[in-house]
Amino acid sequence: MVQINFALKEVNCKIVFYGPGMSGKTTNLEIVHQKAPESNKGTLTSISTDGDRTLFFDFMPLDLGTVAGMRTKFQLYTVPGQVYYNSTRKLVLQGVDGVIFVADSDPDKLSENIESYDNLIENLAEYSKDARELPHVIQYNKRDLPNAMTVEDLDKAMNKFGVPTFEAVAHTGEGVFPTLKTLAGMVLESIDRMDHRRKSPAQKEAARTPEPQRAPAVRRPAQPGAAQRQRQGQGKPKQGGPRRRAARPNGQKKGQQPRRGRGTPSGSRPALARQRRVAPREDAPLRRGNGGGMNLLIFLVVLLAAGIAGVVYFIMNNPEL
């Protein structure tokens, strides 16, 4: 299963070399390790017997550089070819993203090739993986044998799904990297397809769902103007009976303000007239000021007259003076 680390911007894919025993699976991995750049490869781990038979698996990380802004790394595995190690084969296939099936071109190994390929299909099915959808290729190894079967015969006997095939001589490195390069491209394409499949259901559902129709806008009736409200008010009396008009005094015409006077009753005066306040006249203080001065003048004249009368009375009573 593809492992994507968005924090580190890394994509880790798992590729498994599958095939019958002694077909060249470990040899392929060793050639890749020998010829890959030092900065792009990790340590090759191999668990094998004395006769160079893989006991458990071979493993090597391979860095392919940056693809679409993500650093792409492949974990390369091999499986034991012996049939009695089927449980180990199945375990190594867990989470696989691509398979390179290495077939032996020797005619005597054809039955083992077919048996191993059928075993691959069965083990993938136990992980709910379809061999027709899983990226995989077939490598016809040992093409340097004098009695090697033709590619046409091998395709007819083994290539059930029409997958890409490659001729190789693994111990010399011929055909090893083209096989790996093609499968790596197929794995990356499958990742892209899976991403589109995840998005497609939502997009299809959005396309199927019709856009909700907007309800027609309800036009509100225009507010009546003052003249229209007045006409409506004249035609429709208000609740509670007709409005009674206030009685006008005798002799008063329509629209004429009532006169202010003693004879005019206070109840007939308009509210505005009752609320009106008479502003003081500007000449009122002047009038009060003039009246005070006149009184003072009269007081002084009276006082002066009294003084004169007193002086006269005093002279008349004292004739000696």
Image (cartoon, rainbow, N blue to C red):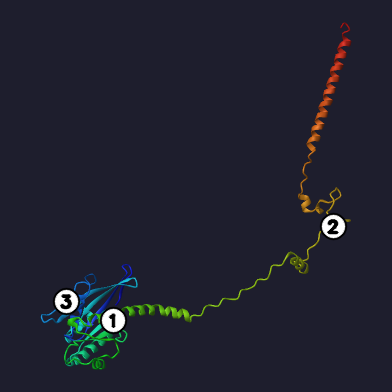
Q: Return the disc, 3 or 1, that comes first in the chain's sequence.
A: 3
Name the one closer to the observer, 267 or 75. 75
Report the quarter where the N terminus lies.
Answer: bottom left
**Mark found first going from the N terminus, 2 or 3:** 3
Can you say which quadrant of the picture contains the C terminus?
top right
Instruction: State which mark lies toward you, 1 or 2.
Output: 1
Separation of disc 3 and disc 1 at Cα? 24 Å
- What residue would you read off at disc 2? 248
Query: Of the residues shown, which amino acid type is indicated by label 3?
Result: Ser
User: In the rendering, at what x and y percent does residue 159 appear?
Assistant: 27, 90
- Helix, strand or loop at mark 3: strand
Q: In the image, which is nearer the foreground, mark 2 or mark 3?
A: 3
The answer to whether residue 182 shows anywhere in this view is yes
Q: Residue furthest left?
A: 50
Residue name at image x 83 percent, y 25 percent: 299
What label sits on residue 240 in the rendered view?
none
Q: Which residue is mark 3?
A: 46
Residue at the (81%, 51%) spot, across then down: 266
| Residue at the spot of label 1 | 182
Question: At label 1, which amino acid type do we have?
Answer: Thr
Which residue appears at 72% of the width and 66% of the height? 225
Q: Which of 296 and 67 lies nearest the eye of the viewer?
A: 67
Can you name the residue that lies furthest to the top here? 320
The residue nearer to you, when weighing 69 against 274, is: 69
Q: Quadrant of residue 243?
A: bottom right
